[in-house]
Amino acid sequence: MPTLFPTDALDGLIRTGGSCRVNVNVEPGFAPGDKVMAININPRTHTRLPTYVRGKRGIVMRDHGAFIFPDTNAQLKGEKPQHVYSVMFEAGELWGDAEFPGDKVLIDMFEDYLRPTNGK
Amino acid sequence: MNGIHDCGGRHGYGPIDIDREQPIFHADWERRMFGMFILAFGGGHFNIDQFRSTIEQMRPAEYLESTYYEHWLHALETLCVENGTLTRKELDDRLAALSKGTH
Amino acid sequence: MSADHDHEHHDEYRPSEISLRVKAIESLLVEKKLLDPVAVDKLVDAYENKIGPHNGARVVAKAWADPEYKKRLLGDGTKAIQELGYSGIQGEDMVVVENTHDVHNMVVCTLCSCYPWPTLGLPPNWYKAPPYRSRAVIDPRGVLKEFGVELPKEVEVRVWDSNAELRYLVLPERPAGAEGLSEDELANLVTRDSMIGVGLPKTPN
């Protein structure tokens, strides 16, 4: 419901912001060290799964806790809170013939973007 | 969506325009646009995901040819119209009046 | 041409249209009592004059001076940064990543422009534009070269794509010769670019 944001609440807003973290008990499906693959989805609607990582294999480095899921929230279809993980991908895996294949890209992956893999 | 915004790994965008003397805002309209976005967000006009999604749906050429805060303007106009806060006609009429100097 | 490069060129052709569109929507929202223009002024003042990379520099300086603080910073970035009074919009959930002898970190948002405002202020234009966003993940060393940084091949480059709501701050390596400097002196060595990961801190004279 669009409202007028009260000016005397501005200092508080600047200082507190609006975290998208959700403090509910959501069981994480993954843990640091897990080998995962980014799923290959191509929704016409909003997603925060970049094209360049889809179908690629990586390792979970960190569990950041549960956050609002942008893919549903953008469509006003609910917050669907789920864990977000730092997942590490090797440059060689992402780009094929990389000049520095050992360099890494770390991306924050929502649980719905991942599936487990037994691979390398 | 597989939009123009999803540019990680793409080629052809050229060198980075580092511009060490950059001010935070290049023009007064950028200042107003910045402030309006925060207040509209704080006032519940849209959530952050809707905002980003709206920018992603810009015409690709328009996205690339316009500046950063123009993206924000596009999103704010679009979402205010979608919300029913404003109509396209109100925006057009006001723009016309300002252009003529009659507002 | 990048949108960045086009910026000045565009304004020459239609210097007023964008500013009039902004005036139009602002005046309508104000009339409908959905926006207070004084609040816009206050926000602009906060982010143009008060909040900036000098905040992040203090965080880095304290981490350089105080090993216990550094541990807390790397363990829970949000809480440790809040200890110094920095928090809020676009910095609600912070992760600090450390540069070492073996690892160099770089931060990007390939999908838009996500950036840790409370510690670094608003992002520079180049950070928000496709040239950086596209190349940081596929050619980070090429990007670093453009910024004047060349890393030995033994150093691992880690690029963090801030595609969710975590915001990343790079903790640069403390430069040699900085031992014994005060926190204020240390903070003066910390550049904004070094906290994004496209630069290195200054060395003490």
Image (tube, coloured by chain):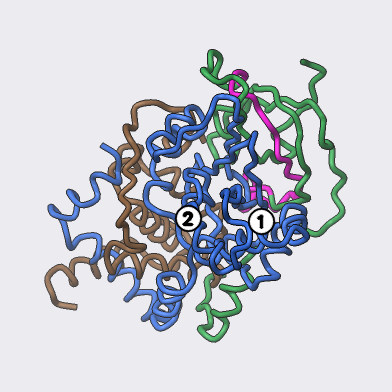
Q: Is residue C48 magenta?
A: no
Question: What is the drawing colour of chain B?
Answer: brown
Q: Which residues are magenta?
A: A69-93
**Dot 1 falls on which chain?**
C
What is the x, y in percent for residue C49?
Answer: 41, 74
Identify the chain drawn in blue. C
Question: Residue shown at 65%/22% (left/top)?
Answer: A56
Q: Is residue C103 above or below residue C74?
A: above
The reply to the same-chain question for discs 1 and 2 is yes
Q: Is residue C188 above or below residue A41?
A: below
**Dot 2 falls on which chain?**
C
Q: Could you classify mark 1 by the number of other residues whose Cα lies within 10 Å: few (under 14), some (14-19), or many (20 or more)?
A: many
Q: In the rendered structure, find residue C25 and report the number of the disc placed on it.
A: none
Q: Are marks 1 and 2 in contact (CB under 8 Å)?
A: no
Q: Which residue is mark 1?
A: C94
Q: Is residue A113 visible?
A: yes
Q: Which residue is mark 2?
A: C192
Question: Residue shown at 56%/62% (left/top)?
Answer: C186
Q: Could you classify mark 2 by the number of other residues whose Cα lies within 10 Å: few (under 14), some (14-19), or many (20 or more)?
A: many
Question: Residue shown at 83%/36% (left/top)?
Answer: A30
Q: State which quadrant residue A59 falls in.
A: top right
What is the x, y in percent for residue B3?
Answer: 45, 35
Q: Is residue B20 left or right of residue A13?
A: left
SS for callout 1: strand
Identify the chain drawn in green. A
SS for callout 2: helix
C44 and C75: which is toward the camera: C75
